[in-house]
């Protein structure tokens, strides 16, 4: 996703920025840009800013800058992953004030940008992009230069502060949302002002100057002693040093952290593998996927859908088409779409769908789910469905990917780039996005009231903290469960209802990274065949959270226990009774059944990873698998 780098010092800023941006490429992005102070234009009253932006890879920007003969020693750079506004040069960062004398780069989302933009336009500001970010440039400009009176609100004109850091602080006071921000101003050569709220920013001092970045990887060659800025803290970087303030402008002295990771570890955020890093990011994925989705009147806002509410109201059949983990997200969605919206929903492997003759009418909605957005089977199924007259809606993690381009509408999951071959955080992003879609369908079909949708939306948001609780408290229990099954030849994952859908994802995770054979079964089906597999010590991993089918699931587990199975249960916190049949219990917080997939899948991801590590497997790059499956 988006990345920030900035430098001020004595060396060539151009090279340092490009190098930092390349280091941030792994996050995924669609455009890149830099703002460089034009040293040649420097005088006592300031300098000028050169802005260079390109859609596509940093290498393209690098070639453009290669022709630029500059002695600039101060600048900011950015890689953008589109959220508001398509990938394009005008939407790429840096964004500038009306007079081009202030430039900013920003990570995060400004929730009140529409109101702010309206106010700023009323006061005469001209916008050059569709982004939420640009409001920051104009807000800083007003704080710096002065604000005209606003006849619409009766607000008086205000004088400018002519201090970049103070202007950034003032601008932040108007913004609701998340930001990691770096700004430069032609009137203050060599100065970079920095702010942070809910979006990471690190700052460091090296031999040749001062650095800012959204990820330590971008500056690790220059400095290993960094300040991890906290929410509400601000910094002023200059060639001679760095000062920090709080939101009131009072000086502070944040602690310095020494980074002792190597480059490989730094790319992984200090974690031993990408899979763990990505699992730990899941609370953020839930939060980011929900940002801006609830309108002021309690109505859901998914305007990327490409369908009017009237068209949505006519939908009478839904197909979810996908492969692998994305297919499992579809299994969860079926329960929600049928349960809440009362629309028949079928989930099909895209590789099967494309060779069938499914019943499709103009009122059929096909939802194509794909992390990579380029899975060949899913793409072929999309094309087939459109030829047959269906509306196709894509859910993908990759901006501008073929799935996004070829669908009538798209929701981007806010997972950021996923590197481990085994999907974890993108699954959570998919389930949250599909849950929003199910709520929207229920809303337009008047199956749920606005009040019910609002309550469910709030509970959906609560899953972020619930995942965090699992990550914080259940690692020992997961480790013990992994030890209990790492030497097995095979394992069964079982559950009922939502639990059965979750079991499928648990089994896929385990088999793909640990090479331990695993199957998922609806627990009630065990007695129709699979129970024959069970002999003493055979691992049965169950999802048995408190749900309407809890007692039924427990009965099925007793049948396994009676045959000597080793039973590992994902259960609801506080369920002590389950210990009577379980050898190992991993708890998740109590959660509405509809949202249990978002939480109960997390311990199964961690379990698979632990087992794989115990078996000496490479959890990020399992054998025979590719991250994008672009062949049939
Ligand atoms: C998941 O862990 C897998 N590696 C795989 O099943 C994956 O989900 C599948 O290939 C679909 O990929 P997509 O979501 O990119 O379309």
Image: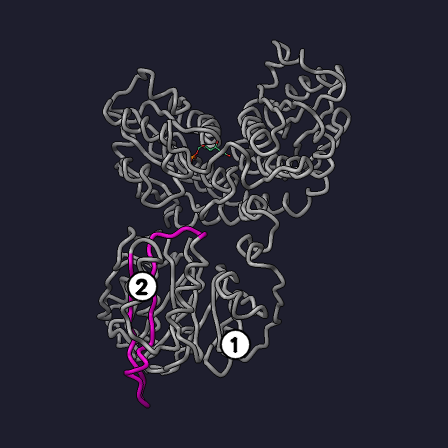
Q: Is residue 36 magenta?
A: yes
Q: How far apart are marks 1 and 2 (CA)?
A: 24 Å
Q: Earlier in the sequence, mark 1 or mark 2?
A: 2
Q: Determine if residue 42 is in view.
A: yes
Viewer-proximal residue among 47 and 612: 612
SS for callout 1: strand
Q: Is residue 51 above or below residue 402?
A: below
Which residue matches tag 2? 134
Q: In this view, does 1 lie above or below 331?
A: below
Residue pictured at 39% horizontal, 69% vertical: 15
The C terminus lies in quadrant:
top left
Residue 430 left/right relative to 121:
right
Main SS type for the magenta part? strand
Residue 100 pos. (x, y %): 26, 73
Q: Is residue 269 above or below residue 611?
A: below
Q: Residue 602 sits in which quadrant?
A: top right
Q: Does the magenta stretch include residue 309?
A: no
Write down the region rendered in magenta: 26-54
Residue 192 pos. (x, y %): 42, 75
Residue 526 pos. (x, y %): 62, 14
Give the crowd class for mark 1: few <14, some 14-19, many >=20 residues within 10 Å: many
Viewer-proximal residue among 580 and 443: 580
Give the crowd class for mark 2: few <14, some 14-19, many >=20 residues within 10 Å: many
Residue 55 left/right relative to 226:
left
Extreme-top residue of the structure = 528
Residue pictured at 33% horizontal, 41% vertical: 401
Which residue matches tag 1? 245
Residue 470 pos. (x, y %): 64, 43
């Amino acid at each position: 996703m988006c990345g920030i780098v900035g430098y001020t010092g004595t060396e060539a800023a151009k090279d340092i920025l490009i190098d930092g941006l390349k280091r941030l490429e792994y996050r995924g992005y669609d455009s890149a840009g830099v703002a460089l102070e034009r040293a040649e234009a420097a005088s006592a009253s300031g300098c000028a800013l050169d802005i260079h932006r390109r859609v596509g890879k940093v290498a393209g920007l690098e070639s453009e800058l290669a022709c630029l003969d500059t002695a600039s020693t101060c600048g900011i750079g950015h890689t953008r992953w589109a959220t508001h506004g398509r990938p394009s040069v005008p939407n790429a960062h840096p964004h500038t004030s009306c007079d081009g004398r202030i430039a900013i780069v920003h990570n995060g989302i400004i929730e009140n940008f529409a109101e702010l933009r309206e106010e700023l336009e009323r006061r005469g500001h001209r916008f050059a992009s569709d982004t939420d970010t640009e409001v920051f440039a104009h807000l800083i400009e007003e704080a710096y230069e002065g604000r005209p009176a606003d006849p619409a609100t009766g607000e008086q004109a205000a004088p400018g502060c002519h201090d970049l850091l103070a202007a950034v602080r003032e601008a932040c006071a108007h913004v609701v949302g998340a930001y990691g921000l770096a700004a430069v101003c032609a009137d203050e050569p060599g100065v970079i002002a920095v702010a942070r709220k809910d979006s990471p920013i690190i700052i460091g001092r090296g031999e040749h100057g001062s650095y800012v970045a959204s990820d330590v990887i971008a500056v690790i060659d220059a400095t290993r002693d960094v300040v991890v800025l906290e929410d509400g803290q601000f910094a002023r970087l200059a060639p001679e040093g760095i000062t920090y303030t709080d939101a009131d402008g009072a000086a502070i002295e944040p602690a310095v952290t020494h980074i002792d990771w190597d480059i490989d570890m730094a790319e992984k955020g200090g974690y031993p593998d990408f899979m763990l890093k990505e699992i730990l990011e899941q609370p953020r994925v839930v939060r980011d996927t929900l940002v801006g989705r609830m309108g002021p009147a309690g109505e859901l806002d998914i305007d990327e859908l490409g369908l009017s509410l009237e068209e949505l109201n006519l939908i009478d059949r839904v197909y979810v088409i996908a492969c692998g983990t994305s297919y499992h997200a579809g299994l969860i969605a079926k329960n929600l779409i049928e349960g809440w919206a009362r629309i028949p929903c079928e989930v099909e492997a895209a590789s099967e769908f494309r060779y069938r003759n499914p019943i499709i009418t103009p009122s059929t909605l096909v939802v194509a789910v794909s992390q990579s957005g380029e899975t060949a089977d899913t793409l072929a199924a999309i094309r087939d469905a459109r030829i047959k007259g269906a509306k196709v809606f894509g859910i993908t993690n990759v901006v501008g990917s073929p799935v996004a381009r070829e669908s009538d509408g798209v929701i981007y999951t806010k997972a950021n780039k996923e590197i481990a071959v085994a999907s974890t955080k993108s699954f959570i992003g998919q389930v949250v996005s599909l849950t929003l879609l199910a709520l929207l369908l229920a809303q337009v079909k008047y199956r749920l009231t606005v009040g019910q949708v609002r309550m469910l939306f709030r509970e959906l948001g609560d899953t972020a903290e619930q995942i965090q609780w699992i990550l914080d408290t259940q690692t020992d229990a997961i480790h013990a469960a992994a030890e209990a099954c790492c030497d097995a030849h095979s394992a069964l994952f079982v559950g009922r209802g939502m639990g059965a859908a979750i079991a499928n994802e648990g089994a896929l995770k385990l088999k793909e990274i640990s090479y331990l054979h695993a199957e998922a079964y609806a627990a009630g089906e065990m007695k129709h065949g699979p129970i024959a597999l069970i002999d003493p010590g055979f691992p049965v991993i169950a999802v048995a959270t408190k749900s309407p089918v809890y007692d039924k699931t427990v009965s099925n587990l007793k049948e396994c226990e009676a045959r000597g199975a080793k039973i590992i249960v994902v259960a609801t916190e506080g369920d002590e009774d389950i210990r009577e049949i379980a050898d190992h219990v991993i708890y998740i917080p109590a959660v509405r059944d509809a949202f249990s997939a978002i939480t109960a899948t997390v311990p199964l991801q961690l379990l698979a990873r632990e087992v794989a590590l115990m078996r000496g497997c490479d959890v990020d790059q399992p054998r025979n698998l590719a991250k994008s499956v672009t062949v049939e």
